[in-house]
Amino acid sequence: MNHFAYRAHQLFAEQVPLSAIAREVGTPTYVYSSATLKRHFRVLDQAFAQVPHLLCYSVKACPNLAVLHLFSREGAGFDIVSGGELERVLRADPDGAGKTVFSGVGKSEEELAAALNAGILMFNVESAEELLLLDRVGRSLGRKAPFAIRVNPDVDPHTHRHIATGIHTAKFGVAFAEAASLYRKGRRMRGLRPLGLDCHIGSQLVDAAPVRAAIGRVADLYGRLQGQGLGLRFLDVGGGLGITYREERPPSVEEYASAVFEPLRGLDTTLILEPGRVLVGNAGLLLTRVLYRKRIGQKQFVVVDAGMNDLIRPALYEAHHELLPVRRRRGAAVTADVVGPVCESSDVLARERRLTLPRQGELLAVMSAGAYGMSMASNYNSRRRPAEVMVEDRRFRVVRRRERRSDLWRGESP
Ligand code: LLP
């Protein structure tokens, strides 16, 4: 469910025609719908209402300050993976640290210290050596760092191989068998305080079975650790719930919630969730303009002004994003490759797509681009990263201006 819809053949974001945004802000531009973001947050929050829980929005999905601020007003916490994301959270919500969990396999000493100083809720520790370093950081700051061990539950999440994290060949977490001994060590260290247990099995999950299986394993371990008097309070089940890009049928939030609840069997804990894509994916689109059309042999190409530097998902994961004309009109359907301006043959936003051949200058909306769109954008080919716009009912505002040319060489010296 989102607030992008046609009215009299014009595509709108809430009450704003996308053509008005393109006219004022230019293209390519990411457009987010605040009503959709709020709705997604509330529906997910409601699905977990029957148990104590905290939704920690996974900042990496779309880290714009306006998005963080919106979720913070809804009562969200945050899931971060770097010191930079911590800075963003603090800018968007000066009290956000106490609701923030910090995951990632390669946290530096500096990042650990900054997060401990800021007073984050919990470190999701991913190796024995990280635990030792965190203890050292805790002792040198005279504090006990609250930690969870991120275990690798070793289940196949049935998703794209690049985003499967909870399988034993992935780099994430510690082996299940190693976790209990790390807690035993951790509880004796002066710079540490055991607080939770964490897992995350992957992203764009469209099947509830692996979620149930992973949480079953993790809930058992949590119960055993509790039996040893560790005093854990949080069970962090990660993020990963998928969305519909094309024909996927991911579990509804209610089905997802029951896949999480069932294996818990009344465990006394506060659940932490780290949703990213499900909150922002379908709440954002990438607005782009057609530059040229051409045929090479039998093949029709449509060249647009958004490239793989703006949205890398199709090139990196063979991801499918729907393409909608901003102004719908009659015309013969063709099969075309919709490509960007970047000098790489993988710069294809849509391959062999059936669409009404757009005219030069017409606008297209690349749908479901709210998650891992702008956050993975780069300056490749010395292209300025897009602007970002937040729509609120009849109004819209630029929440990140388009990069200026001088931003491209900021910090460089000839
Ligand atoms: N928690 C942890 C520890 C994660 O690694 C991730 C995502 C999340 C939460 C949020 O997952 P979500 O709810 O968004 O699925 N760039 C890829 C996705 C990478 C996901 C990385 N980790 C893509 O564009 O599909």
Image (spheres, rainbow, N blue to C red):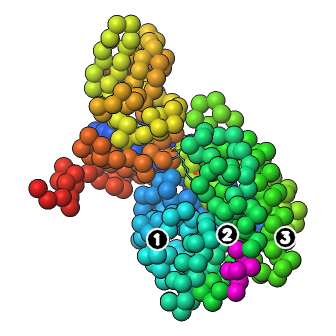
Q: Which residue is mark 1?
A: 108
Identity of the amino acid at label 1? Ser
Q: Using the image as rendered, state which of residue 356 and residue 211 is in the foreground.
A: 211
Instruction: Label 2, secondary structure: give it.
Output: strand
Say which mark, if any, is on residue 223. Answer: 3
Report crowding for label 3: few under 14, some 14 to 19, many 20 or more residues within 10 A (C-alpha). some
Identity of the amino acid at label 3? Gly
Q: Residue at x 87, y 66 (%)?
A: 266
What residue span does the magenta drawing correspond to? 182-188
Choose the circle earlier in sequence order: 1 or 3: 1
Pinpoint residue 327: horizontal percent, then vertical percent.
Answer: 40, 26
Pinpoint residue 389: horizontal percent, then vertical percent.
Answer: 38, 50
Quadrant occupied by the N terminus: top right
Choose the circle earlier in sequence order: 1 or 2: 1
Which quadrant of the structure image shows residue 332? top left
In the rendered image, the vertical position of residue 48 relative to residue 391, given as above or below = below
Pinpoint residue 160: horizontal percent, then vertical percent.
Answer: 60, 39
Give the Cα separation between the discs numbered 1 and 2: 17 Å
In the rendered image, the vertical position of residue 63 relative to residue 402, given as above or below = below
Which quadrant of the structure image shows residue 380? top left
Q: Using the image as rendered, state which of residue 345 and residue 311 is in the foreground.
A: 345
Majority secondary structure of magenta residues: helix
Instruction: Label 3, secondary structure: give it.
Output: helix
Quadrant occupied by the C terminus: bottom left
Q: Residue at x 39, y 7 (%)?
A: 298
Q: Which residue is mark 2?
A: 149
Pair 2/3: label in front = 2
Left or right of residue 303, residue 75 in this image: right
